[in-house]
Amino acid sequence: MVKLLLDGIEDPSIRYLNGYRAHGGYQSIEKAITMSPLDIVEEVKKSGLRGRGGAGFSTGMKWSFLDRKSDKPRYLVCNADESEPGTFKDRYLMEKIPHRLIEGMIVSSYALGVRHAFIYVRGELIWVAKHLEHAVGEAYSAGYLGNHILGSNFSLDLTIHVGAGAYICGEESALLESLEGKRGYPRIKPPFPAVSGLYGCPTVINNVESIAAVPWIVTHGGDAYSKIGVDKSTGTKLISASGHINRPGVYEIELGLPVEEFIYSESYCGGIKNGRALKAVIAGGSSVPILPAELILKTASGQPRLMTYESLNDGGFTSGTMLGSGGFIVMDDTTCIVRNTWNLARFYHHESCGQCSPCREGTGWMEKILHRIEHGHGTQADIDLLVDVSKKIEGNTICALGDAAAWPVASAVRHFRHEFEFHVRHPDQVTAPNHVANAAAYKYEEITHAKNND
Amino acid sequence: MPKITIDSIEVEVVQGTTIMDAARQIDPHTAPPAMCYHSGLNGSGGKCRTCLVKVVQTSETNPRPMPKLVPACRTLVEDGMKVENNSSPEVISARKGIVELLLINHPLDCPVCDQAGECDLQNLTFQHGAETTRYTEDRRRYPTKSLGNLIQLHMNRCILCFRCVYAADQLTDGRDHGVLNRGDASEIGTYIEKSIDNDFSGNLIDVCPVGALTDKTFRFKSRVWFTKPVYAHRQCETCCGKGVLWLKGHEVLRITGRRNAVGEVTEFICNTCRFESKSLHHWEVEGPAPIDQRSVISQNHYTS
Amino acid sequence: MNPTFSESTLSNINRLLSRYPADKRKSALLPLLHMAQAEFGGYLSPETMDYVAQLLTLRPIEVYEVASFYTMFHKQPTGKYVLEVCRTGPCALNGAESIIDYITRKIGVTINEISSDGLFTVKEVECLASCGTAPMMQLGERYIENLTEQKIDDIIDRLKHGERLDIEPNPENSILFRSCQGQSNG
């Protein structure tokens, strides 16, 4: 198994500078300062590294958009506002190996000509921020941060910043607003942050995992990185596995691993808990479309589904989904899809910033309709209304939160319409006490609730 | 100068013009509707999404496709751009959806709302909305809060366009109100009850597209269509002194700023002119104010 | 009485401000509000927010706007220990709803209420990025994961008796704060 990001994680001392250096840490800086910044950008482009926050956009391309002609300062901001339900990989990496992210920040800043970089950590992860802060202090003392790093002309300051509870701040322009001490409202683009970002200056924003991959790429070269993985899904990816599985946790996989192996292998999820059957998977964090068991294991054309950007997207949204942030949520056959969809709709309703009208009003409406259906007060027309409202939001909002709220709802109805119809037709059964009062999902097996029993 | 085609009509505009302003140059009445954008307020726009249009062709120099609908008020014209506004079924359908979403939590209390007759949301709904609602849940309601003796706040009617926030930032000497909370619990307020009081605060009323901020001194005095708007001016040291007097007989019921063809107040007036000069002898009357023929206010034919 | 930061906090604030560009003091608003909430009773009263506004030379409304946007800032007093239990997606799949139900019954409060002894407030929160160890909750600065009814019993009993919880300590001398009164590990 290839391990680039989590290499050395079994050694608890890797959290601290000496332990990290014992595992070869900070070598990429020595190499980087002998290279020209643009050459490093080239290496990152060659590596094929794609943004690990969810969008999957080429990191090298994003870097090349940075306005280098501007005479304003340039900023690098690391998006460590990990809040997507099902995703907990960045937290794990930062908590266990904070120096890997810091090394990535230093090398990336050098490549981008940045003198002041920020790591925006979600406020709830305060102790992770403290570990990072401690590690930053160590890096300053060792001469990896501050003036004239390792005797070169390159100087860098790194600030750990904490948020205060808002999923929307994971959207890069909302994150910048928040970092400026404002409400986390996404900005209307263009202009893009590469031209006008933090404090109106050219800014690159990257996910923790993307930045943590850069030291390896600099040390070993972009070509070496591109040989890992398959096709346009190069390198390794951290997958956060959760839900009804035997071995939940963060796994670093080589992209291209079959989904079936990931779910059932003892090296990864270890199969479904309590020996139950697989019902559905949300493969890339709560925002991506849910897929039923038959479509997550194999594509519509019968090919084995792989853990890659392309394979997971095979079939578009009709029969596919997205790799997203790699938040892999597994559901067994006792899961009520309607309740799960309502739960996620409630999340997006709660997290909508309220700036643009379709998302502000639409997310609340979807939650209400789903609540009604789940609690036995829905009608057949509500199911179509639900899909229609999701379409009114999708694509019409300032940022991607609107889409993120619409996709789980639309896909749940697309693939599990029979369950929605069951709720509408059998309100007596879905309002049974064990359904509502003891709504823990694992108790659902007690009621006739699934496709086969309808 | 860049040329742009909107619904098959070509227009040449200066560099830096938005699609919205280009469309308004062609015809203010067919231009995309704007609930949050106000040309007199920097940074406004992009939020209500009623002005979404389809860019079917971008420029040759920047051929990046725009697969999603874009807000006309915040998208700059590029040479050779082709835009569909009223001619695109996709745009019309999206707009209808936005109107429905703007209305689900709106109280629809037009019969008792002072804004009725000059309300952008009313007009928008008439032009682009559906006849009925599919929303059956309870509508959002806020506790009544006071902003002082001059401005009446009806938060239930607010569509969160943010215009009043920009206006307070840009026209007054310090903003005391803002948008509080988050998501659909967002509200306009001062947090701790406080009256909004400064020389230009009355303009918050004029920029509000709905009946959320209305003139407290005009409250329930008359339906707007029973009043006669006339242009008038006066010597004022604080502002331009150019206003509209809304008359009933010789009584001045209300004073507002003057509006352009798309209903935006472009020259802002001070509170002395607005609230403390409510008598004809304070003003020199110029003549009837032009009113859009389609407006209910023009139905009285008083302009002739 | 008007809130005033202690000398040591004021020196921490100077350290904090030095981490942002000199003309961008507003950037320190979120961390500063965390400090204020930690120091002034576990919530942000209007007086506290006005004080923070004054420190950063902002208009009070700018602080109210920000404080009311973020869920970690409490605008009302809370119990000494705030149990913030995740209710989202993967946690819900693993029994979050019955755990929340159990906690509130055990303490005898409804969500967001302060217990009669003033010790506890239970809040439902959205995903805390701990889905692999569901169900879970945040207590002060730390996460408590893989919650079971037994674990809840143990935690609540210990907190009631003023005992420490068995949680790994944080790095010391940090100027970053999680705003809460009852630090579970300190």
Image (cartoon, coloured by chain):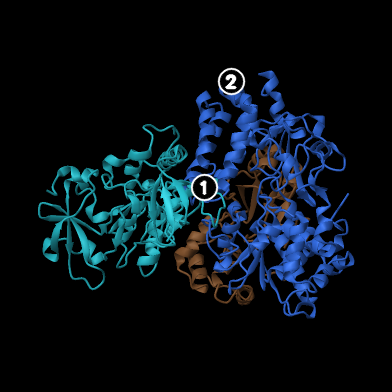
Chain colours: A blue, B cyan, C brown
* Residue holding disc 1: A397
**Secondary element at image label 1:** loop
Q: What's under tag 1, amino acid-wise?
A: Thr
In the displayed structure, does residue A80 sit left or right of residue B294? right
In the displayed structure, does residue A222 sit left or right of residue B91? right
Instruction: State the quadrant of the C terminus of chain A.
Output: top right
Q: Which mark is residue A426?
A: 2
Write the residue at 38% across / 34% down. Answer: B130
Q: In this rendering, does residue C19 appear at all?
A: yes
**Picture coordinates of residue B18 (x, y %)?**
43, 56
- In the displayed structure, C105 sits above or below B45; it is above
Circle count: 2
The answer to which quarter of the image holds residue A445 is top right
**Picture coordinates of residue A217 (x, y %)?**
80, 61
Among numbered discs 1 and 2, the one appearing first in the sequence: 1
Question: Are dots 1 and 2 on a single chain?
Answer: yes
- In the displayed structure, A201 sits above or below A263; it is below
Q: Chain of mark 1?
A: A
